């Protein structure tokens, strides 16, 4: 599948509030075609770079807002778990109900963070591809300096979010029985119509796997191949997805 179609499909499958935050690949592609046939090359290149910089600003603002929210939510979840474990519940039923709510919130939280890592991956890949098209069609040399700039942007720096993702997976594996998580994932999979986070997360994992798979056309601008961690939560996503994620 061509990148433009894959991006369009992914945007349609992601959370509704995120859909305007992705790379405007279609319009940039049209602009590259116009520039390649334009007599005012310098002016057109300046417009192209201006639009790319606006896209980067959009990515950074959105990514940093989400990252800040994730840090707060992660701390809140840790505090909830600590309170439940340290307090004396009035009944076993009350304890189990609260742990079930925490489990659901952790799984949803994990899914949103996977979406954000994918957001970074797919927008970087789109930038690299549109710059490659620009250089190929115009004979320009924008790709290398611009990608070097992109690599320094907040939206590309996913180490913190990836760390939180791993911590969530560890919490799930340590606190909750594998069978319980698997059953809940199976139930989620049967109701994948609509905008469920399970559906969004599976789609994100599939997209990341696709855009980061090794191929003969890999270059130093390509993201490394994705290797999913071997945790019960990830295995639950893979087992209960109607489409394989690997």
Image: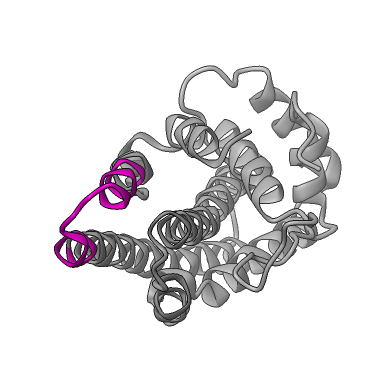
- Counting from the top left corner in percent of width and height, residue 229 is at 80, 60
Nearest the viewer among 152 and 43 is 43
Question: Image check: 95 left or right of 112?
Answer: right
Quadrant assignment, res 150: bottom left
Total number of numbered labels? 0
Seen at 55% across and 41% down, the residue is 3
Nearest the viewer among 246 and 163 is 246
Decide: is 79 above or below 153.
above
- Counting from the top left corner in percent of width and height, residue 16 is at 35, 34
Image quarter (top left, top right, bottom left or bottom right) of the C terminus: top right
- Counting from the top left corner in percent of width and height, residue 46 is at 19, 67
Nearest the viewer among 176 and 202 is 202
Magenta region: 29-46
Question: Image check: 6 left or right of 1?
Answer: left
Seen at 66% across and 43% down, the residue is 96
Seen at 47% across and 20% down, the residue is 194
Residue 43 located within the stretch drawn in magenta? yes
Image quarter (top left, top right, bottom left or bottom right) of the N terminus: top right
- Counting from the top left corner in percent of width and height, residue 245 is at 76, 39
Residue 210 located within the stretch drawn in magenta? no
Q: What is the image's colouring?
A: one colour
Quadrant assignment, res 85: bottom right
Outermost residue on the front side: it is 39
Decide: is 18 above or below 145.
above
């Amino acid at each position: 599948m061509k990148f433009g179609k894959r991006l369009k499909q992914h945007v349609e499958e992601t959370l509704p509030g995120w859909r305007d935050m992705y790379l405007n690949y279609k319009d940039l592609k049209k602009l590259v075609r116009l520039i390649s046939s334009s007599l005012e090359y310098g002016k057109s290149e300046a417009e192209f770079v201006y639009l790319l910089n606006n896209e980067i600003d959009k990515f950074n603002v959105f990514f940093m807002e989400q990252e800040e929210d994730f840090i707060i939510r992660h701390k809140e979840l840790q505090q909830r778990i600590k309170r439940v474990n340290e307090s004396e519940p009035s009944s076993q039923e009350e304890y189990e109900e609260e742990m079930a709510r925490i489990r659901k919130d952790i799984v949803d939280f994990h899914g949103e963070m996977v979406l954000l890592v994918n957001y970074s991956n797919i927008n970087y890949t789109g930038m690299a591809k549109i710059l490659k098209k620009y250089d190929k069609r115009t004979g320009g040399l924008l790709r290398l300096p611009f990608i070097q700039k992109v690599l320094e942007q907040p939206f590309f720096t996913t180490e913190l979010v990836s760390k939180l993702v791993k911590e969530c997976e560890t919490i799930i594996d340590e606190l909750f029985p594998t069978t319980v998580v698997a059953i809940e994932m199976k139930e989620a999979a049967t109701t994948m119509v609509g905008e469920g986070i399970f559906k969004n997360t599976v789609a994100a994992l599939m997209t990341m796997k696709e855009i980061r798979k090794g191929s003969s056309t890999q270059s130093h601008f390509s993201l490394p191949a994705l290797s999913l961690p071997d945790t019960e939560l990830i295995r639950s996503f893979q087992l209960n997805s109607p489409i394989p994620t690997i």
